[in-house]
Image (tube, grey):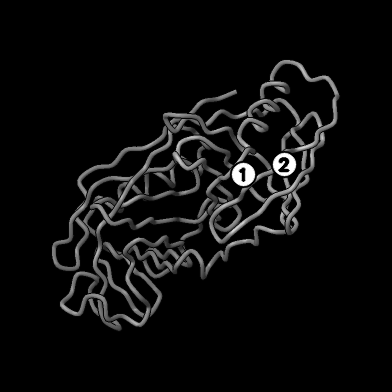
Amino acid sequence: MRILGLLVVGVALTACGNEVPVGGPSAGESPGGSPVGGSYLSVRVTEDGKDKPLAPGSRLRLDFGDKGGLGFNAGCNQMGGEYTLDGDTVVMDGYGGTEMSCGPAKDAQEKWLGEFLTQRPVMTLRGDVLTLTHGSTTIELKPRKVVEPDLPLDGTTWTVEGLVSKGDLVEHFGAVPPAYLTVDGGRVIGSTGCNQFHGTVAHTASTLTFGALAITDKGCTGDARRLQDGVLARLKGQLNYSIDHDRLELRRPDGVVGLDLTAQK
């Protein structure tokens, strides 16, 4: 079991014309739209004119919010910090985030990306391609929904990755069978990791409303029981949901209690 704090970062950024600096005078007129409020994933990284390989199974991700911060992920931790624009130059003096280790390759990549972003790279926008350049290094990114479209809610089997509690704490259960659920129209079926369940669910574009769930009665102990109790306690009434490619977030209206899930592969 592991409990981790989640980093929340925001950003304010202005976009520009067809191929002008992001901070240029034609803000908001780019055919590719504005990075404000969006997430971008790397499609190519080059150094000295040659492709730079990334750590296996990873992409670089930049998250642009609307409150003066820039979030980033290099395949491991959620990182971010405050920044400003000096013309077309990104000025970011420091950053922070979660502190997991994901192996030498991803740890080194995360350090490299953090250093790159704090070295005042130049940012430009051409269509939907966002480019950051410093020295001989260039990172090209596209909107996350272009690179990795969202999976459908219905028909996808979503595995519980963690129980979210007040204070944005996520509790993981890696030593017991995983819980999962599948929404199929007005029905939901799944497992707590110990018992099977099914029931009714109504959903809109942003909410799921669960009816009473019927569940088998196999005895569960230890972490298996704690996972089951946590899942069943959260699959009640109305929950807000959002999908980010292969990740599903379920949250109560208070926004701080719910489930984090990933698509089963």
Which quadrant holds the N terminus? top right
- Say which of 238 and 190 sits in front: 238
| Residue 246 figure quarter | bottom right
Q: Is 12 drawn above or below residue 178 in the view shown? A: below
Which residue appears at 66% of the width and 54% of the height?
202
The residue tagged with tag 1: helix, strand or loop? strand
Residue 28, x across and y down, in percent: 26, 76
Q: Is 208 drawn above or below residue 41 in the view shown? A: above
Q: Which amino acid does label 1 sit on?
A: Leu
- Say which of 103 and 8 sits in front: 8
Lateral position of residue 168 relative to residue 86, left or right: right
Residue at the top extreme, as displayed: 222
Residue 154, x across and y down, in percent: 70, 59
For the residues labelled 2 and 1, say whether their Cβ atoms are less than 8 Å apart.
yes
Location of mark 2 (residue): 180
- Which mark sits nearer the N-terminus, 2 or 1? 2
- Say which of 18 and 51 sits in front: 18
Q: Which mark is residue 162?
A: none
Lateral position of residue 116 relative to residue 59, left or right: left
Q: Is 100 drawn above or below residue 56 in the view shown? A: above
Location of mark 1 (residue): 261
Q: Using the numbered discs, state the Cα–Cα distance from disc 2 to disc 1 in whole angstroms.
A: 8 Å
Crowding near the residue tagged with mark 1, few <14, some 14–19, many ≥20 C-alpha atoms within 10 Å: many
Residue 231, x across and y down, in percent: 66, 33
Lateral position of residue 46 relative to residue 250, left or right: left
Residue 72, x across and y down, in percent: 38, 50
| Residue 12 figure quarter | bottom left
